[in-house]
Image: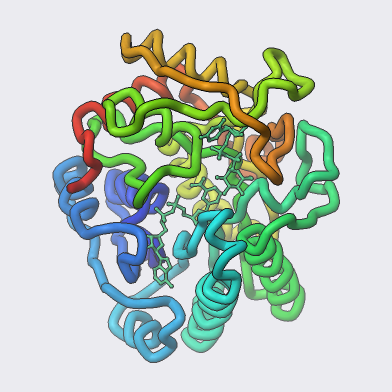
């Protein structure tokens, strides 16, 4: 039996595939390479000494998805495939709704057809919207402030409705906080296209000289030093949460949303200072106005993952930044 990993050549997907191969799980990856390259597959093989089966296909293509399920004995799916840039989603919302929401419906339809009813889904802390106060708890009301967030929220609603309609489904929706870091080998890591939107890829590209300086979006928030606070989570810890979730599915019918964070908040300036300390490189920065849509503080209540999955984050901020720096300094241009 194989696990199907959609989006498995991407940032979080590739780290999860490494951990799955390390436990001798057979893996089939479906990715359309919209935001990744097959170079990550070579690196995954270099790390693990094992190969995943790769199929270049779009999850929106129902016939192609049927072929995948026909050709492979799939026991469950980890569904990473999706577009994820918040800003871009406000400019091309239809692409986001089509790719993320319609694509997921196609995937679920085909899973239904082949009676594969085990799913782990990549959700996001963005579903908590802007009206809840951290620590964010799974029972809090959800909302969305941009099309990307809407797609995650809509998919969660679809998953809850589906699980309610048919008791054979077991679904875990993992709500990721802020994934950063890279595999300790330095062989795989985050490889964004163009100018990065997220803090860590931006800081690391400043550190290797690809970008001139960081803009710190606001220093007048009600936080420890005025800059935004987030719950950064090491991508390998996040990958391991997926393995725990897959293992928990058989004893967890229905649809369950679970936070994946550390429960700790770190400010932008704390990140910059830690990065300087570890890389021994200066990170020039300038304080600029707040980024529209940002909130001051976001961190998880991380208890449920521990209770239900037996998972908790094990890597600290030093690990996260050292691994980010190793990846970026050894691969200044990513996989290129
Ligand atoms: P990523 O872009 O590196 O990986 C996503 C992968 O999905 C890419 O390889 C892309 O080519 C593929 N893909 C996109 N649309 C596809 C389609 N229609 N058919 C087949 N493949 C398709 O992103 P990531 O950071 O690894 O994120 C993985 C998932 O986690 C996404 O669903 C994302 O929304 C979610 N998530 C990410 C973060 C984060 O900060 N990275 C936070 C919360 C949630
Ligand atoms: N920041 C800067 N300068 C930058 C980039 C970010 O100061 O160049 C600050 C932001 O203002 C924020 C913090 O760094 O305070 C983190 O910003 P990111 O963009 O890295 O992460 P966000 O928390 O804003 O966004 C992440 C995911 C989104 C998701 C959101 C909510 O990237 O996909 O969490 O869960 F929607």
- Residue 113 visible in this rendered orientation of the protein: yes
Query: To which quarter of the image does residue 190 belong?
Result: top left
The total number of labels drawn is 0
Query: Is 219 or 62 nearer to us in this picture?
Result: 219
Q: Quadrant of ligand 1?
A: bottom left
Query: Is 123 or 94 nearer to us in this picture?
Result: 94
Q: Is residue 132 above or below residue 161?
A: above
Residue 12 x/y as whole percent = 41, 48
Residue 323 x/y as whole percent = 34, 26
Residue sitting at x 79%, y 56%: 143
209 relative position to 197: left or right: left
Residue sitting at x 39%, y 45%: 195
Residue sitting at x 32%, y 40%: 189
Query: To which quarter of the image does residue 98 belong?
Result: bottom right
Display coloring: rainbow
Q: Furthest-bottom residue in view?
A: 63
Q: Is residue 270 above or below residue 102?
A: above
Residue sitting at x 85%, y 52%: 141
- Residue 302 visible in this rendered orientation of the protein: no
130 relative position to 64: left or right: right
Q: Quadrant of the N terminus?
A: bottom left
Query: Is 291 or 127 nearer to us in this picture?
Result: 291
188 relative position to 142: left or right: left
Residue 10 x/y as whole percent = 36, 54
Q: Is residue 216 above or below residue 18?
A: above
Residue 185 x/y as whole percent = 23, 31
Query: To which quarter of the image does residue 329 belong?
Result: top left
Query: Is 78 or 296 nearer to us in this picture?
Result: 296
Q: Is residue 259 above or below residue 112?
A: above
């Amino acid at each position: 039996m194989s696990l199907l990993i959609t989006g498995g050549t991407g940032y979080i997907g590739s780290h999860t595939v490494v951990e799955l191969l390390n436990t001798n799980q057979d893996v089939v990856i479906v990715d359309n390479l919209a935001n990744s390259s097959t170079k990550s597959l070579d690196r995954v093989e270099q790390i693990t000494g094992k190969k995943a089966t790769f199929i270049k296909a779009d999850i929106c293509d129902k016939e192609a998805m049927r072929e995948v399920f026909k050709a492979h004995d799939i026991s469950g799916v980890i569904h990473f495939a999706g577009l994820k840039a918040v800003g871009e989603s406000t400019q091309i919302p239809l692409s986001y709704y089509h790719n993320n929401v319609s694509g997921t419906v196609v995937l679920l339809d085909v899973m239904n057809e082949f009676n594969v009813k085990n799913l782990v889904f990549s959700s996001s802390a963005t579903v908590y919207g802007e009206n809840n106060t951290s620590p964010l708890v799974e029972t809090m009301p959800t909302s969305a402030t941009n099309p990307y967030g809407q797609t995650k929220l809509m998919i969660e609603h679809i998953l809850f409705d589906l699980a309610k309609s048919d008791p054979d489904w077991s679904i875990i929706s993992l709500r990721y906080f802020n994934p950063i870091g890279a595999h300790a080998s330095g062989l795989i890591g985050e490889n964004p296209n163009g100018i990065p939107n997220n803090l860590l890829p931006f800081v690391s590209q400043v550190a290797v000289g690809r970008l001139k300086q960081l803009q710190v979006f606001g220093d007048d928030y009600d936080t420890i030093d005025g800059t935004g606070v987030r719950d950064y989570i090491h991508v390998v810890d996040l990958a391991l949460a997926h393995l725990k979730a897959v293992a928990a599915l058989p004893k967890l019918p229905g649809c369950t949303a679970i936070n994946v964070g550390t429960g700790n908040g770190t400010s932008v300036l704390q990140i910059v200072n830690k990065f300087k300390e570890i890389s021994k490189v200066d990170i020039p920065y300038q304080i600029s106005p707040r980024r529209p849509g940002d909130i001051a503080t976001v961190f998880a209540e991380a208890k449920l993952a521990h209770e239900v999955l037996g998972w908790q984050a094990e890597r600290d901020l030093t690990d996260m930044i050292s691994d980010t720096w190793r990846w970026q300094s050894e691969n200044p241009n990513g996989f290129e």
